[in-house]
Amino acid sequence: MSQQGFANEDIIIAYLNNKKFKFLNSNWQKFLKSIFLNPGNNNKVFCSKKAGQNKSDIIITINKVSKCISVKSGTGNSVHQEPVEEFIQFLKETYKINEELADNIRLFIWGDGTLDGHGKLKDRLSAPEFSKQNPQIIKNIREFFRRNKRDLIERFVITGSKSKSSPDYIYYGNRSSGVWKRTDEGLLWLCEDSNESNGAIPVGRLTFQAWNRNINGGDKSEKKRGVIQLKWGTVGEDLKSIFSE
């Protein structure tokens, strides 16, 4: 998440925490009424950040009942990052993928013609260049993701690889205004064939990519190589569309 995203969470927490429900703006009253059966005008709202590597960003509690929320804002959100070898190990344990597919994923993420990122700087390719030169590799990865997209999207967006807290709701917006949906309803939308991403390797509405290929070299971004990233490039427009249905 960007620094703006973290700042947005902090502003929301400061606005909600230890406030009586009746003193909140209409946006938050409407949201809280939709997720709590009876928030009660005089009940206090408690809100805090969900610590650790969790898909939930904040937790809201009213009258001892708590709900976990994933907060989104801005555009082009990254919804998941993970070292490529950890991801491949997960795929082997869960889907028993063969070594050919594992190597295809390694080649795509490193983008330098090697399986471990130790290739020459001059051999590093952008995603479009790699896709043009290696259409069969792209096809193999795409087909696997298409067959398993529902479970994979759930892991990328809701359960996470190390998360101990899954969100009950996704909220897109800020302190003043927002839209929301239950995560299970959002998941169904993300999996719809008609909503598939236009990225080189789609996973439903998400795009599978390398976090940073560091094509030009330099120490600043080198540590970001060898990491998968799932991007929800049109998150703002999509969530508004989902929530208006």
Image (cartoon, grey):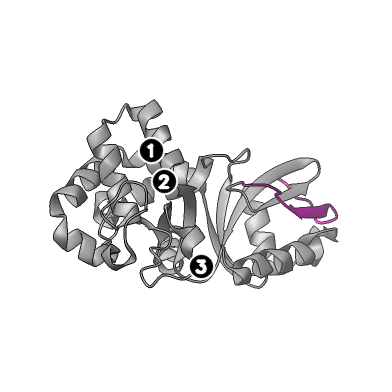
Q: Is residue 245 left or right of residue 48?
A: left
Q: How many marks?
A: 3
The kind of secondary structure element at disc 2 is helix
Write down the residue under mark 1. 88
Residue 36 visible in the picture: no
Tell me the CA gap for discs 2 and 3. 20 Å
Name the amino acid, label 1: Ile
Name the amino acid, label 3: Asp
Residue 182 x, y percent position in the rendering: 52, 48
- Quarter holding the N terminus is bottom right
Residue 163 x, y percent position in the rendering: 59, 41
Residue drawn at (78%, 47%), measured in percent from left and top?
Answer: 62
Name the residue nearer the viewer: 123 or 83: 123
Residue 38 lies within the magenta run: yes
Up/down of 221 relative to 161, above or below? below
Residue drawn at (29%, 53%), measured in percent from left and top?
Answer: 108
| Magenta segment | 36-53
Residue 184 x, y percent position in the rendering: 47, 43
Write down the residue under mark 3. 219
Cβ–Cβ under 8 Å for marks 1 and 2: yes
Name the amino acid, label 2: Val
Cβ–Cβ under 8 Å for marks 1 and 3: no
Dot label at residue 3: none
The kind of secondary structure element at disc 1 is helix
Name the residue nearer the viewer: 70 or 109: 109
